[in-house]
Amino acid sequence: MKNKALIIIIPVIVALLLALGGVYTVDEREQVVVTQFGRAIGEPKSEPGLYFKIPFIQLANRFPKNLQEWDGDPGQIPTLDKTFIWVDTFARWKIVDPLAFFQTVNNVIGALGRLDDIIDPAVRNFITSYPLIETVRRTNRELDTFEVGLEQEEMKDKRRLGTVKFGREKISKGIMEQAQPKLAKFGIELVDVKIKRINYVEAVQTSVFGRMIAERKQIAEKFRSEGKGEARKIEGEKEREMKRITSEAYKTAQEIKGKADATATKIYAKAYGRDPDFYSFVNTLDMYRETLDKESSLILSTDAEFLKYLKGYTGK
């Protein structure tokens, strides 16, 4: 009984393995090239669905159908005006002929190597064929940026970077047009090429940054000079205002003092007119108080006018 069961089960298992090995699917993101002993058989399968092949003899080689990335290695390239810049590019590509792709580069890694060999020289050819302004600008649109501290005429000079005749977009398009015919034989279509980043090389950066620092220092010094001038102007105005206020205050004080002296003199005159002897007596006592103390020593004759009230002098 066991032998009969084995006789039935073994053929079923073999049949299942053969069936599974002879069926494969293709989804919408991929395309398949069937090979037999390393050689392509039939047409590539690009439409999604269920397909059949000879089990264990034929193999299904799968390749992506969607867009693929290529990121170039940044490199130092001189422009036409002998400015060394650091250029970083990227591209998008896809497999349009899977059979040619399989027969030439065989896989995505091999395709990326071919893209390196073709796109990098095209980038170098175009960058070296145009001045720096062509690689960084698209049009001759006037720059709408400005720097605080720079005069209008000076800013106009800084904006005169040159005239754009070709532009960055056309350079990218030219790179793609130069590289695409060389990639067609590999079953590859180059969809787009763009310059991702442009920068000065380190030696040029040092010079540019030094110039920028010098310009900023010049602007800062200009601000300091203008600030000092404004400070001197404010201080001068303050001094003039203080002198004006002091002069007016002195004038007002002298006027008040003059009026007070006049009033006092008038009062004194009235008082003196009423009793000249009493007025003379009071004034003399005040003079004694101011000039005589315990430390004072006077040598006067007996008929000195200064001591007349001390001698009992009463007038006439």
Image (spheres, rainbow, N blue to C red):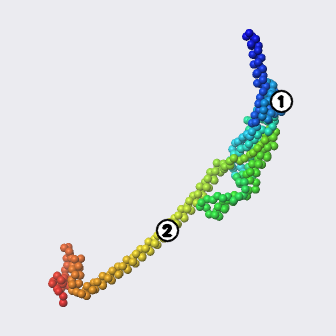
Q: As drawn, which residue projects farthest toward the right?
A: 42
Looking at the image, can residue 82 be seen?
no
Q: Nearer the viewer, residue 118 or 41?
A: 41
Q: Nearer the viewer, residue 68 or 312?
A: 68
- Residue 259, placed above or below residue 155: below
Q: Secondary structure at mark 2?
A: helix
Q: Position of residue 22 (x, y in %)?
A: 79, 25
Q: Position of residue 256 (x, y in %)?
A: 36, 79
Residue hosting label 2: 234
In which quadrant is the N terminus drawn? top right
Q: Nearer the viewer, residue 69 or 14?
A: 14
- Residue 152, placed above or below residue 122: below
- Residue 293, placed above or below residue 115: below
Quadrant housing residue 146 = bottom right
Determine whether label 1 and label 2 are within 8 Å by CB: no
Residue hosting label 1: 41
Q: Nearer the viewer, residue 66 or 276?
A: 66
Which residue does the image show at 77% across and 46% down from the upper left?
176
Tell whether 315 sits left or right of 82: left
Q: Position of residue 195 (x, y in %)?
A: 71, 47
Q: Which amino acid, mark 1?
A: Ile
Neighbourhood count class around disc 1 (C-alpha, 10 Å): few under 14, some 14–19, many 20 upward: some
Tell whether 143 sits left or right of 20: left
